[in-house]
Amino acid sequence: MAIHGFESGQLVVCQYGLPREVQPWLHDVHIGEVVEPGDDPAAWNGHNSERAYCELAGVVPVLYCARFPCYSCHERYPQGFRQHVGADALIRITAEEATLPFPAKVLRFVSAEALRNLARVKYPGAAELLAEQDKETSA
């Protein structure tokens, strides 16, 4: 059953959890999967269900880095980590986007300037992708 227009299994990234443009190498892009909120009040807080909380608060339960673990948290959270995220902060993505290499994710979800900064610190693959992008924009 959908919650705020997101179906269980939908892949997402959170806008405010993306790497920062100035130092995009500090952490990876966390790929999340929307999970079905629980309907049992006893399993949530004893008063209302997780679904009721999500509907009231405008949030969506998301399991991050489980199906698509990232380099910055795969050891710390081998099963992923779960958060309730504001529906307006989530960006729907495809499985293809989820499997992009990190420099391509930076370009797709952050900015070309972030990719330039990634290339400046010699992150593997960033300079090559930047050169491709520069070639495409100058053509």
Image (cartoon, rainbow, N blue to C red):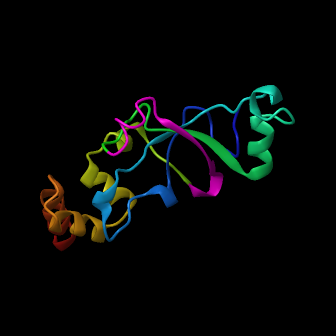
Q: Residue at x 46, y 45 (%)?
A: 93
Q: Residue at x 75, y 36 (%)?
A: 50
Residue 3 is left or right of residue 69, and the answer is right
Whether residue 137 is situated above or below residue 68 in the rendered picture: below
Q: Is residue 52 magenta?
A: no
Q: Residue at x 65, y 31 (%)?
A: 36
Whether residue 87 is situated above or below residue 65 in the rendered picture: below
Q: Give the residue at the far front of this rendering.
A: 76
Residue 106 x %, y %: 32, 57
Tell how many labels.
0
Residue 63 is left or right of residue 124, and the answer is right
Q: Nearer the viewer, residue 37 or 10?
A: 37
Q: Nearer the viewer, residue 14 or 50?
A: 50
Residue 28 x %, y %: 34, 50
Task: Tell me which segment is drawn in magenta.
Answer: 72-89
Q: Residue at x 57, y 40 (%)?
A: 62
Residue 102 is left or right of residue 121, and the answer is right
Residue 68 x %, y %: 38, 35
Q: Nearer the viewer, residue 95 or 50?
A: 50
Residue 8 is left or right of residue 94, and the answer is right
Name the image quarter holding the C terminus. Answer: bottom left
Q: Quadrant of residue 111?
A: bottom left
Residue 13 x %, y %: 48, 49
Q: Is residue 74 magenta?
A: yes
Name the image quarter holding the N terminus. Answer: top right
Q: Nearer the viewer, residue 75 or 117?
A: 75
